[in-house]
Structure formats: structure tokens, C-alpha cells
Image: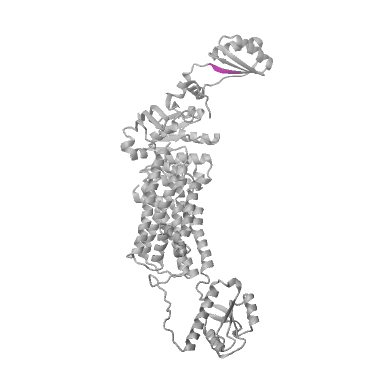
Amino acid sequence: MNVLEVKNLQKSFGSIKAVQDISFSVEAGEVFTIIGPNGAGKTTTLEMIEGLVIPDHGEIRFGDMNWGQHAVAIKMKIGVQPQSSAMFDLLTPEENLDLFATFYEKARPTEDILQLINLTEHRKNQVKKLSGGQRQRLAIGLAMISDPDIIFLDEPTTGLDPQARRHIWDIILELKKLGKTTILTTHYMEEAEKLSDRVCIVDQGNIVTIDTPSALIEKLTKEREIRLAFLDGEKAAKEADTFANQLTSVSRTEQDGAALKLWAIKPEDTLLDLFKFTKEKEYQVEQVSIREMSLEDVFIAFTGKEWRD
Amino acid sequence: MNNFNQFKKMFAAQLKLTLREKQAWFWGIFFPVILMVIFMVIFSGSSDDEFQSEIAIVADNPNPASEMLLTQINQLPILDVKSGEPVSRSTAEQWVKDQEVDAAIVLPESAEDTSFVLVVNKEDEQGVTTQALSAILDKIVQQANLSAVGATPTYDIQFESVTASTNELDYTDFLLTGMIALSIAQGGMFGMVDLVEMRRKGLIKRLRMTPAKMGIFGLSDMVMRLLFSIIQILLLSLIGVFIFGANLYINFFSLTIIFLIGALSFNALGYFISSFSSTQNAYMGVANIVSFLMMFLSGVFFPIETMPDWLQPVSNILPLTYFAEGLRDSMVYETGVLSGTLWFGIGVLVIWGVITFLLGSWLYKRKSIVAAR
């Protein structure tokens, strides 16, 4: 069942076409991630869906509701964590949650939210004294206070340290368990890969592709990077390098000390040949790995752009 | 949640926000109190005392004419004769030089001599005391002249003061009501800086993403601000009345009206300033200029009548002028709600409030389209 449907969204600011033509639909219970470089139109798209920006053209439907006729009903159903984690700095997390709870017809108990976002300990500290990660968690908590079916998280982990980022991932996975639909934007490929059911890559106001992270990676028939390290040192690595360069499946190699990197289209065949060679020479291979393809590679392949964190 | 409950919760949050904002307490409560105390101590300390001057009398050759004048001078309570009796001219001149006395009066040397000499220090030549002394002496001389020819004065000046009401306004009352007007006005003009901060941090946008009723939110904010202003009135009045002996004759009905209109109007002015200031500093800059201009041009510390004529028309359009006058009318003169001047002032305040509010709203609307990006 689709809980959100977006059709042919367009938005210009002056002469800048921020969103050119974006259409997608989101199913109930999935984590739908929009990724793309800065200025790709992610935030504008999100703000149109959230009802903050009126699109120049296109349609946004939440089930059978739309912004024109059901603005209040939609606001009751959705929870939003905007990029600027805006809240009352002089109030405590508890007070912020209590205040936001009054805006809605139904609200989850403040206690539950505090537990979910792991801020029970800091419930009585003024927000201005919280760390960046704690603030961000509270912002997500504020988005959840009304127990919404659809939650929008706009770059929830930008600027956080790895520990804090993991905290937020846990919350998002928790939301998924609760059956909530999450629409996420992020700068981090790793995050999109870990959390999302489907990823939507946006560039220059257009959708480049939409699919599951693994399907996107599979679509790439690119060569893979193989790494080997030899216990017998540089000599073994050099000999293996020479051997590998004779193989037709290997496109290029890089040898550095006892380590060897090679790029091949069919890594399993290449490895078989290489191990035959080392067995013959009685060299011991200390480590071997095939680097996983990541969404980053997908992104570069689809947009032709380097990914910048 | 119903509207009243929502209002109660929002008001509770506003109350906490205000209580925790140290700046609000400093500028809204502490600063006006300090300013009022300083002004009252400086300017109202001796203003209640009557004119009095210490003089020396020189009567080197006592004669009937000088005796008669000496008795007259001694009868005047405002002239205090140093050492109680005439001294020699040189002693008197020394006293004048050392400023131990305000002046020395040299009485006629003989019955035929008809001239006085008033000796004053060069430094005080143009001073108020000298002027007053010479006027008093003039009066004595005139009377002496009249009695010398045996006539009675035909014309006489009777001094009477007239005010609009029965209660008189002394400087303490003037300053107290002015300070109350100023602090409420500043509360409005500076208080809206919160809005700039809320917009800058994206809090206004955040609230617009919720189904929160912004009208109720604004109302709870306004009620909080009015409450804060009532605290200002009470505190300043208590200090004015109990420490500096101000006299208040309050007409509560007119006070309530002028207070509400004034406070709302200055909040609208602050709202207007917030609509075009994108940072806190920009807002504070504008608010400071406006508040400074009004502070000195609106008859808060000194009556407008004492200002140069060309400047007075400026005062006559400033809202603070009418707010201060309205507060004076309702707190000191006990003016009722039927007074025409009161309503004229209210009219001016309403015009200011409505225009600035509409301009502010218009600018906010225009900006939100641009700022939506």
C-alpha cells in the first residue's frame, strides 16, 4: 500500500530550477532514502512534501489526502525533523516534548519518547546544554511525539560523531520495527545502505534511479578490487604481480611492499589462477579480500560525480 | 486538545521561557529601576525645598533708613543673614569671595543716601540666586520708595498655579510615570527580538510543520508580555511611592485602557522591526536607535515644553509622548475615560500600532516566500 505518492513535482526559485521533475511513491513501513549531492533538490523536495513549500507543478498525495484540502489532517499524520534542529533552547527535552504534544490530537507519552531517543537521563537539562547528538535525538523525538505514521528525517546524522550517528541509526531501525514509514535524506552512503529498503538517487532536480541498495549495486557490472598480502614479503608480491599482469581478466595492478591490489571483472576466476600460482611457488597468502561495492560506487556510476561527504 | 488547554500549556511554556531569559529581567526590570533611582536621586533631591539664600549685611553707619531696611530684610524668611547682624564691608566682601554667602547687601550710609549696593561673586553674576536676590531687593526698594512718598501700591501680583486637575505633579511623579511608560515601551520594542531568533533558528518553520494553532501561540506570548509589563508597573510604582514619596491618584479604568493600547502598540512596533531584521544584532541596532530617540524626545525625563520649539513637532508624533502623557493622566491626575486628550493619545497609539503591525505582517509574508528555500 502506498502511503505517499509524488507525481511530477517541479519547483523553481527565480531562474534556478531546484526540482525539475520528481515522481515516486513510498510504501507503508519502508525506509525510503533520498540521496544526492548538495543542491540536488533533496530538501526542496522534502519541504514540498511536508507542505512548507508550494510546488509550481505536480501532485502530492498522502493516501487520499492532499495539502490543498486536508492540511491539518496531514500535519496530524506526519512527523518532521528538519535539518535545522529547531526547538526551544531554554526548555528541557521533557518540556519541549510536552509542549509539542499539545499541538496534536493524540500524543505518545513523553516518557516513552524520552526512552526511545535515550534522553531520559537528560530530561531535566535545558536544551542549550545538550550535545549535538542529543539535540538531534530530541529533534527526532519531537517528530515522533504525535505517533505519526510517516516520519521525515532530513539529514539526521550530518555533523555527528560515529557514536552519535549509531545512536540515531538504532532509533531509525526501532521505528521500522514499530511499522512506521520513514523518509530519510542523507549525505552518508553507508547510512543509506544500512538503513534503507529503497534508495532514490537525485541529481540536478531529477531522479537518477530508484531501487533497493543491493539491486543498485548489482546493476553495476564493474570490475572489482582484490587485495592480497603475502607472508613471504615483497619478492612474492612482485612475482605475483608479474603473473597477474599476464592474466586476461586483470585490467591493472598495484604492488606496494608485500601487498598487492588488482582489478578484475571476474574476481573469482582471477583468484583461482592466482592461488594456483602461489601454491606452485609455495608462497603463503596472509590476507585476501574482495572489496564490497558500495552505494558510493553506484552514485559515481550513475551521476559521473565524485562523492563528497 | 481543546483550545483552552492548548493555551494553558503554551502559556506555561512562555512563562518558563521568560523566567529563564536573564536578559529580559535585566533590561525589563533591573535597568529601568536603576535608571529611575539615579534620575530621582539626582533631580528630585532638593527640588521640594523653597528658595533660600544666605547673605551678609553691611551697615557701617547705622541710620534710620538702614535700620528700617534691616528690619524688613530680617523679616524675610528666605534670606538668612550670616552671623545674625551687620558686619564690616571688608568681612562681607571676603565672604562673598570665598562663596560663604551668596551676596552681601550694603545698606545706605546715611538717611539721605538712597542707594543700595548688592555685592556678588563674579562667578555667580548671572546665577539664578543673584537674579532672585536682586528682584527681592528691588521689591524692598520699591516699597521703601512708596512709603517714602506715602502712597499705597495700586497693582499687586498674586501668584497662583494652574493645572488641568486638582492634583499637582511634582518631578517625582513626572519621572515615575515617564519611567513606567519607557520600560513598557522598551519591553515591546526590544522583546520581539525573540521572533528574530526563532526565525533564524528555523523554529517558526518548525512550528508551521505542526498543526499548532499559531494564533493561540501568539496570544499566549502576548499575555505573557502584558503580565511582564504589569510587574514593571507595580515594581516601579512601589519604589517611586515608598522610597521617593511619589503621589499617585490612579483611575484604574483609564489606566487599564491606556496600558493595554500602549503595550500592544509598542509590541507591534517591535514586531515591525523584527520583520526586516535578519539577525539579532540588526534588530538590536534598530531598536536601540528608536528607543534612544524616543527616550529623550518624548518627555520621559523632562517635559516636552522645555525642549527647543523646532524639536517639539517631532515629539508630537512619537507614540511614547502620548503613552507617557496617558499614563500621567491616569496615574497622577486621575483622569477619567471621558477625557478628550486621553482619547486623542489613544488614537495616536492605535494608529502607530495598526500601521506597524500591518507593515510587519506584510514584510513577513513577502519574506516567507523568499525564505522558503
Residue A283 visible in the displayed image = no
In which quadrant of the rendered image does the N terminus of chain A lie?
top left
| Left or right: A309 as drawn, with respect to A144 | right
Q: Nearer the viewer, residue B3 or B148?
A: B148
Q: Residue at x 47, y 62 (%)?
A: B308
Q: Position of residue B243 (x, y in %)?
A: 50, 69
Q: Residue furthest front?
A: B112
The magenta-colored residue range is A223-227
Q: Percent x, y for residue A269?
A: 55, 11
B132 to A112, vertically: above or below: below
For the image, the number of numbered tags is: 0
Q: Position of residue B182 (x, y in %)?
A: 46, 59
Predominant secondary structure in magenta?
strand
* Residue A226 sits inside the magenta stretch: yes
Q: Is residue A135 visible?
A: yes
Towards the viewer: B331 or A260: B331
| Colour theme | one colour
Q: Is residue B290 magenta?
A: no
Residue A14: percent from the left, percent from the top?
41, 33
Q: Nearest the camera: A252 or B123?
A: B123
Tell me what residue is drawn at x 60 percent, y 9 percent.
Answer: A246
Give the answer, above or below, for where B41 lies relative to B120: above
